[in-house]
Amino acid sequence: MFNKNEIGTLLLRVMLGVVFLANGIAKFQGGIENTVGWFDSLGLPGFLAYVVAIIELVGGIAIILGLGTRIVALLFGLIMLGAIFTVKLPDGFLNGYVYDLVLLVIAIHINLNGSKLYSLGQLVSKNRES
């Protein structure tokens, strides 16, 4: 049987993936050019909008499936740090970065602990050992 920690981490992994996947989709549906313009207005290079959107989209799918979980979680954590320090910090905790901080902490947890339950990455590694 599965232990509580594995189930909890699975729930965190899937929810993190769903949130980032939805944000990645939104960046493309809303017109990636708008996101590029917003990045430019923040003083960030516009091409970073593509990088972030692709990481969110592809990484969201990957982490839901349990592929490259620790690497994707690390990338998500870096995105959250960037969002907090370039955009959200001046607005304070509740009105600014609280949501991003929660996502950052979940990403750190997944990066540190991995998530093997219902993970395609775990399935692939088991098949390699056989």
Image (cartoon, rainbow, N blue to C red):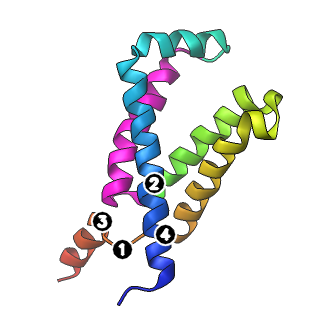
Q: Which residue is mark 4?
A: 9
* Residue bearing the label numbered 2: 15
Q: Earlier in the sequence, mark 2 or mark 3?
A: 2
Cα separation between marks 3 and 1: 10 Å
Q: Residue at x 71, y 26 (%)?
A: 87
What is the spatial separation of the Cα atoms under label 1 and label 4, in whole angstroms?
A: 8 Å
For label 1, the SS is: loop
Residue tagged 1 = 117
Kindly identify which numbered label has been placed on residue 95: none
Label 4 packing within 10 angstroms: few (<14), some (14-19), many (20+)? some
Alpha carbons under labels 2 and 1: distance apart: 14 Å
For the view shown, which residue lies furthest in the bottom direction? 1
Task: Tell me the kind of residue under disc 2.
Answer: Met
Q: Earlier in the sequence, mark 2 or mark 1?
A: 2
Inspect the magenta stretch and tell me whether residue 81 lies in it. Answer: no
How far apart, in angstroms, are the residues tagged by discs 2 and 3?
A: 18 Å
Contact (CB < 8 A) between labels 1 and 4? yes
Query: In the image, residue 77 lies at what x, y percent?
Result: 59, 47
Q: Nearer the viewer, residue 82 or 19?
A: 19
State which quadrant residue 42 falls in. top right
Q: Nearer the viewer, mark 3 or mark 1?
A: 1
